[in-house]
């Protein structure tokens, strides 16, 4: 397995862990952790936020499943979700609210774009070369 694939898989696993724990913390009070902060832009109840995090979790999981089976749609789904994750962080908080979540999503997007650039299925007219 190539290093780029490992980076993509590990970053996806981090997104899965993040969104599953966030969903859990919205519905279960854990001493010392508390409820996740969604900023003050929107007033949304905790159960709705938990549900939205489960949806994001499922979409990342479906994308990772497709990616590990070498389906190009899996890569595109993960990119879309990573970009949506960044945008939603900024929407719920404010522009330039840089967190680990945003950094991992950015790394994931860049890694997948590089992966797709090297994937011969992305451009059938241009053969893939390992550099």
Image (spheres, grey):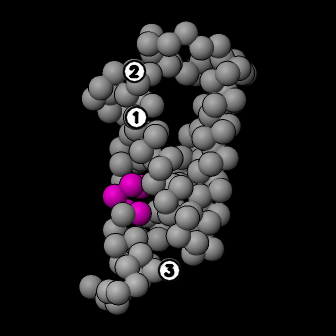
CA separation, marks 1 and 2? Answer: 10 Å
Q: Residue at x 51, y 55 (%)?
A: 78
Q: Is residue 37 above or below residue 86?
A: above
Q: Nearer the viewer, mark 3 or mark 2?
A: 2
Q: Nearer the viewer, residue 18 or 95?
A: 95
State the image coordinates of residue 42 (x, y, percent, origin top left). Answer: 50, 13
- Main SS of the magenta part reads helix
Q: Which residues are magenta?
A: 108-112
Task: For residue 21, say whether it is visible.
Answer: no
Circle 2 sits on which residue? Answer: 93
Q: Quadrant of residue 64?
A: bottom right
Q: Secondary structure at mark 3?
A: loop
Q: Is residue 31 above or below residue 81?
A: above
Classify the position of the C terminus by image quarter: bottom left
Q: Nearer the viewer, mark 1 or mark 3?
A: 1
Give residue 10's mark.
Answer: none
Q: Secondary structure at mark 2?
A: loop
CA separation, marks 1 and 3? Answer: 31 Å
Sequence order check: which comes first, mark 3 or mark 2?
A: 3
Task: For residue 129, say whether it is visible.
Answer: yes
Q: Secondary structure at mark 1?
A: helix
Question: Quick one: label 3, few (<14), some, or many (20+) residues within 10 Å?
Answer: few
Circle 3 sits on which residue? Answer: 1
State the image coordinates of residue 4 (x, y, percent, origin top left). Answer: 40, 71
State the image coordinates of residue 111 (x, y, percent, origin top left). Answer: 37, 62
Q: Is residue 123 above or below residue 127?
A: above
State the image coordinates of residue 95 (x, y, percent, origin top left). Answer: 29, 26
Q: Is residue 96 above or below residue 108?
A: above
Q: Residue at x 39, y 21 (%)?
A: 93
């Amino acid at each position: 397995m190539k290093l780029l694939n490992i980076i993509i898989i590990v970053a996806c696993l981090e997104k899965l862990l993040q969104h599953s724990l966030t969903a859990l913390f919205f519905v279960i009070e854990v001493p010392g952790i508390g409820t996740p902060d969604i900023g003050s832009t929107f007033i949304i109840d905790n159960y709705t936020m938990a549900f939205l995090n489960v949806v994001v979790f499922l979409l990342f999981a479906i994308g990772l499943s497709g990616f590990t089976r070498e389906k190009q749609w899996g890569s595109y789904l993960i990119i879309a979700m990573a970009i949506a994750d960044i945008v939603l962080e900024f929407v719920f908080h404010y522009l330039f609210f840089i967190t680990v979540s945003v950094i991992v999503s950015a790394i994931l997007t860049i890694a997948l774009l590089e992966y797709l650039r090297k994937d011969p299925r992305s451009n059938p007219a241009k053969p893939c070369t390992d550099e």
